Image (cartoon, rainbow, N blue to C red):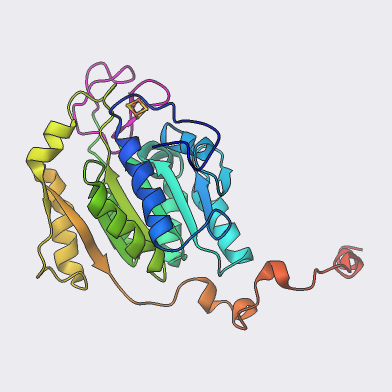
Amino acid sequence: MTNSFSAYSPTWCPGCGNWGIGEALKAALTQSGHNPSSVFLVFGIGCSGNMNDFVNAYTIHALHGRAIPNAIGIKLAKHKLPVVVIAGDGDLYGEGGNHFLHACRGNHNIAVIAHDNRLYGLTTGQVSPTAQKGQKSKSTPGGIIERPLNPLTLALTQGATFVAQAFAGDITQLIQIIRAALNHNGFSLINVLQPCVTFNKKNTYEYYLKRVYKLDQKYDPTNYTLALQKAEESLNEKFPLGILYKDIKPNYHQQLKQLSKETALVDKPRFKNFAILLKEFA
Ligand code: SF4
């Protein structure tokens, strides 16, 4: 990732999957006709979240686990603005797990790009919810006991209407998927398999290159049952890449009467007479 969008260069470790995801994001936004003021990016805390400093756009570097509620708030206030969340697996599925599942349920019209490296890279490699059972780390010297959380299954079963998986080593496909997610009306998850070359010595580029495969041309992304089957393949260490599921449903703000006339909340007259409300407590 060059610093053409920002005054700062990335601080990621050489070879980190974040580089590929960062390049794909910039390319997808540019190819979709966006400029730094036509899109809002919300970053979580973590190595991926540090991209906040490397991209020149409207951004928020949210509190840990709180990227999604920030994104939902921005979307409700200015619902015509595309809003993208960029965060790690620890931030999205750990600290922010509750926000994640409720955003799926609501079909909020935001795109979420998860940098899934199966650990907390910024704090030097502790296991995250997607860590494979038995993975050893500083926080789990005897190996993690819990079974891994499956982000694809979670998103599908909670109502997300666009669920995809990508690999940080395949920028071309990732660009296509991000562009499709930007065009989707509703909640989009792109879970990106992202090697952390410094702390994850198991889920490396070589590991994924032996186990990823692209969904073929005949794959039907409207088939929910098939999508669930594909999502569960990670139990056998197989990782389908592409759009697993896509559905057409009204998003959250389209079902709000307050926004039915297409006027963004930020453009509506401000409520000023708080005395009326205070009187109710008198
Ligand atoms: Fe990437 Fe891991 Fe380095 Fe963080 S610690 S920048 S995730 S390689």
Q: Is residue 195 magenta?
A: no
Asked where in the image residue 265 lies, by quadrant, the reply is: bottom right
Q: Quadrant of ligand 1?
A: top left
Residue placed at 87% from the left, 63% from the top? 281
Q: Is residue 177 visible?
A: yes
Residue projecting furthest to the front: 4
Asked where in the image residue 20 lies, by quadrant, the reply is: top left
Residue placed at 38% from the left, 60% from the top? 31
- The quarter of the rendered structure image containing the C terminus is bottom right
Q: Is residue 123 above or below residue 18?
A: above
Looking at the rendering, the stretch of residues picked out in magenta corresponds to 117-144
Q: Is residue 135 above or below residue 142?
A: below
Q: Is residue 65 left or right of residue 137?
A: right
Q: Position of residue 241 (x, y in %)?
A: 18, 53
Asked where in the image residue 168 lies, by quadrant, the reply is: top left
Q: Is residue 77 left or right of residue 239?
A: right
Q: Is residue 101 visible?
A: no
Return the residue nearer the eye: 222 or 7.
7
Q: Position of residue 180 (x, y in %)?
A: 33, 64
Q: Position of residue 61 (x, y in %)?
A: 56, 40
How many marks on residues? 0
Q: Is residue 221 above or below residue 131?
A: below
